[in-house]
Image (tube, rainbow, N blue to C red):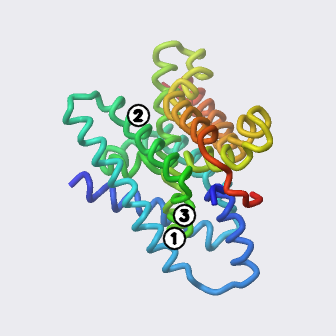
Amino acid sequence: MSILWAFIIGGLICVAGQLLIDLTKLTPARILVLFVVAGCLLSGIGWYQRLVDFAGAGALVPLPGFGHVLAEGVKKAVNERGLIGVITGGFTAMAGGVTAAIVFGYLAALLSKPSGETP
Amino acid sequence: MNQSEVAKQEYALLVEQASPGSKVAGNCLRAFLVGGGICVVGQIFKNALLALGMANDDASLVTACILVVIAVLLTSVGLYSKIGKFAGAGAIVPITGFANAITAPAIEYKKEGLVLGVGAKMFVIAGPVIVYGAMASVLVGLFHFFMR
């Protein structure tokens, strides 16, 4: 059951991104930024957690889920350390995912050959 | 071929604006199927990790890392760009798209050196995401501090 809801909700979040690409002048990079900020703010007011409870990876794997992780991290840090947590919580929460992406992306760059296309 | 999916979509957008014509429904269907499918892969890994006795937050993080590794591998062999061409936002919006956006320019700009090539260009797209994510998290933190 968790897999079905992950499919439906995760798919719908991607459709929202596709609609923004097709119907607005927002570029994909802006949509990524928008989705992370939206996920963070929705999580800040407690709404995104409900979607996560319901859809699991369907809400966590798309980029609003990254924003959710930031919001949860900063709330936890504020509860533990007060105002200091405001400036430590977000980065602490994203540390694992971002470091993994940097390390494996870097290794891939060392081991792969560029395609030769001009980016 | 390793150019990031986000950059490719920016180009596709220019093409689309130059030659309008509605392919929106088909684009959305493919984004739904592939994006949903990536989330299903994530849910399967997460369920397996939870079954192994891992705590919920740890299982979420490890799941994200597994998806990142898969996306990096697919990017480095040139397959992620094929998925992206088919799926559009379905390949961009999941965390695999974020990993692709870091890996593709890192590979492509290797020729400009390890510092200003790989090191800097990795963050062409990931940088803004991290900057605005940090800004939003500080807002949420302040709100939580004063409102809790």
Instruction: Tell us which disc is closer to us: 3 or 2.
Output: 3
Residue B95 visible, this angle: no
Q: Quadrant of the N terminus of chain A?
A: bottom left
Mark positioned earlier in the residue sequence (2 or 1)? 2
Residue B126 in which image quadrant: top right
Left/right of residue A57 with respect to residue A108 in the rendered view: left
**Rendering coords of residue A4 (x, y %):** 26, 59
Chain letter behind tag 1: B
Residue at the spot x=53%, y=27% of the render? Answer: A95
3 and 1 marks in contact (CB < 8 Å): yes
How many angstroms separate mark 2 from mark 1 (CA)? 28 Å
Crowd around label 3: few <14 · some 14–19 · many ≥20 (10 Å): many
Residue at the spot x=74%, y=34% of the render? Answer: B114
**Rendering coords of residue B118 (x, y %):** 71, 38
How many angstroms separate mark 3 from mark 1 (CA)? 5 Å
Q: Quadrant of the C terminus of chain A?
A: bottom right
Q: For the residue marked with disc 1, what is the amino acid?
A: Phe
**Rendering coords of residue B95 (x, y %):** 50, 47
Q: For the residue marked with disc 3, what is the amino acid?
A: Gly
Chain letter behind tag 3: B
Left/right of residue A71 with respect to residue B45 in the rendered view: right
Residue A88 visible, this angle: yes
Q: Which residue is mark 2?
A: B61
Crowd around label 1: few <14 · some 14–19 · many ≥20 (10 Å): some
Q: For the residue marked with disc 2, what is the amino acid?
A: Leu
